[in-house]
Image (cartoon, rainbow, N blue to C red):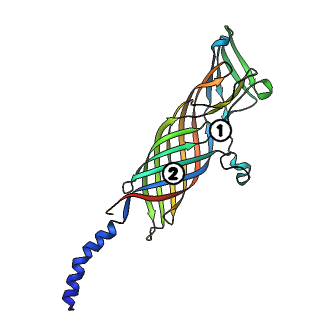
Amino acid sequence: MSFCRILLTALLFLPFSLIAQKRQERAGEFYFSWGYNKEWYTRSDVNVSQPELNTFYTLHSVHSHDHPGWDEGLFSTPISIPQYNYRLGYFFNRKKGWGLEINFDHTKHIIQDNQLIEVSGSFNNKQTDSVIRFSESNGFYYYLNNGANFLLFNLVKRWNWQESPSGKFKLDALAKAGIGPVIPHVQNSFFGQANDAGFQLGGWNMGIEAGMRATFFRRVYLEFTNKLDYARYSGLKVYRGEASQAFGTYELILSLGVTVAAGPKHMQ
């Protein structure tokens, strides 16, 4: 075969070869991650309504904290005991970096024991404005300790910052925003009167999240994000009544995940 024929054959088949290579890229991408978190909460008011007792009052500007758990022996307890989080998502457009995500944070919210709190309202139709010592020994506790439990349905945007020539390492920036319900486990006692503890739907929350994702060998990734969340709780069960509360949260999250290309192939 002459050199001209070889050259002509190469020129004819090269475009088809390039098209075939371009079509190897999947349009979508599933991912799942599991990790742990740390929270800081704003001060908040707790409003208590007990119609059967003719009692309605507010605990003003209470201070609350989390309970990480992962700092007390992560490998010696079940993985779901510490403050954990999971993400299940799908990038429906890998090229442009748009995706949807189910975003759940098992966070713990506890009113600080032994703090002085102003209480105002009416007790058995009698007005009061006083200061109490909020402590378990004094008949007071308030735990969302089996979870304040933020569930969000997020829109996700990803930007590729760095990628190795082989594609086996990528560094991406992420931004997320969403809204969803809160599913708290409610356990409390006010003035020595305890509720029947349990899980319930208790309001709604919305949040924004931003961070970095490092992907290794195209499949495994480590993700670190910062999150701001605002949650409004209502209808929380207390003794013969209900409570409501709203607070903001700043959260740090570290997760380990896997990602799998999915969807129809498209030209890259």
Identify residue type, mark 2. Gly
Q: At x 44% / y 67%, what residue is drawn? A: 167
Q: At x 49% / y 44%, what residue is drawn? A: 102
Residue 113 drawn at (x, y percent): 74, 31
> Would you say 150 lies left or right of 117 here?
left
Residue 246 drawn at (x, y percent): 57, 29
Q: Is 254 located above or below residue 106 in the figure? A: below
Q: At x 55% / y 33%, what residue is drawn? A: 231
Q: Select label 1 or label 2 by which is in front.
A: 1
Identify residue type, mark 1. Lys
Q: Quadrant location of the N terminus? A: bottom left
Mark identifier at residue 108: 1
Mark identifier at residue 175: none
Q: Quadrant location of the C terminus? A: bottom left
Q: Residues within 10 Å of mark 2 (few under 14, many from 20)?
A: some
**N-term mark: 1 or 2:** 1
Residue 110 drawn at (x, y percent): 68, 34
Mark identifier at residue 211: 2
